[in-house]
Amino acid sequence: MTKEKLTARARSKYTDYLVREPMELMEFLAAKMPQASRTKLKTLLSKRVVFVDHVITTQYNFPLKPGMKVQISREKGNKEFRNRLLKIVYEDAYLIVVEKMQGLLSVSTERQKERTACTILNEYLQRSNKRSRVYVVHRLDRDTSGLMMFAKDEQTQHTLRDHWHQIVYDRRYVAVVAGEMERNAGTVHSWLTDRVLYVHSSPTDDGGKEAITHYQTIKRANGYSLVELHLETGRKNQIRVHMQDLGHPVVGDGRYGIEDLNPIGRLALHAFKLCFYHPVTGEKMQFETPYPPEFKKLLIKR
């Protein structure tokens, strides 16, 4: 199927409207759908089929601004999703972007068969269609929080996996690390070898996988540094190993860091930004979450 046909197929699942003047969402919907009662419009919102700039929006008085895009899905709406370990940031017919909390596995492994982000999303989708499921595209470590995405069909999964570096154009993390960083910015370049329970880093090519991490120091205080990290490659435990290489391990990292340094009771690593071209429509998709407040508290000058 050509990209043009795929784009048409994706767009056919939605009715699109462009916002031309500021107004609240309910007022906008009423103007675009004059035949629908206020009750019907509220039902659309509660069924989670109204999107504003690609994000499901249920707030009837959401303030719209000129240039925003409102979409109404033609598919049957899914039931409200509530889970303390997982938040749906964006959903369409082809993919789901979520914010995962720390402590939740992305997917099960041979050694760990517990409840995961994958099983939670499968249960959510199967409330509307028993045959629906998500397909794994990438992962976040159990103790890392932040943004990640799943495909909703096998074709989209293959497109994302096979063309990951062309599709995902910006992926960033924020971390609190031990000690005050010597440099304001830099790059760590090494080769990583997965030894089951530990990833070994070598400064020269020893047969491992090449890994490149760019970093920028945002703030230094109280013996910690707040660091923003941009991945050029996405290897297992890459950031944690590379920060250890710099001599500034991630706070709360018992494996690659200082065992007793855990002032906030979690690994201080969060995937806060995910930007990619939609694998079907080609549209630019940009998602960002705030830095976790507990990270900032460590850097408040006393």
Image (spheres, rainbow, N blue to C red):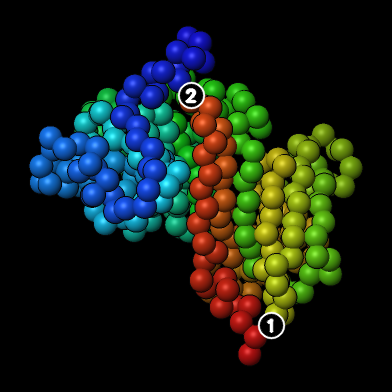
Mark number displayed over residue 78: none
Looking at the rendered structure, the kind of residue marked 1 is Asn
Instruction: Please state if 140 lies on the left or on the right of 235 as rendered.
Output: left
Looking at the rendered structure, the kind of residue marked 2 is Val
Q: Is residue 120 above or below residue 166?
A: below
Q: Secondary structure at mark 1?
A: loop
The outermost residue toward the bottom is 302
Neighbours of disc 2 within 10 Å: few (<14), some (14-19), many (20+): many
Q: Secondary structure at mark 2?
A: loop
Q: Residue at x 57, y 28 (%)?
A: 161
Q: Choose the circle earlier in sequence order: 1 or 2.
A: 1
Q: Is residue 67 above or below residue 243?
A: above
Residue behind mark 1:
222
Instruction: Please state if 259 lies on the left or on the right of 155 as rendered.
Output: right
Q: Residue at x 84, y 69 (%)?
A: 182
Q: Is residue 293 above or below residue 200?
A: below
Residue behind mark 2:
280
Instruction: Please state if 236 lies on the left or on the right of 2 as rendered.
Output: right
Instruction: Please state if 283 lies on the left or on the right of 71 as rendered.
Output: right
Q: Nearer the viewer, residue 70 or 84?
A: 70
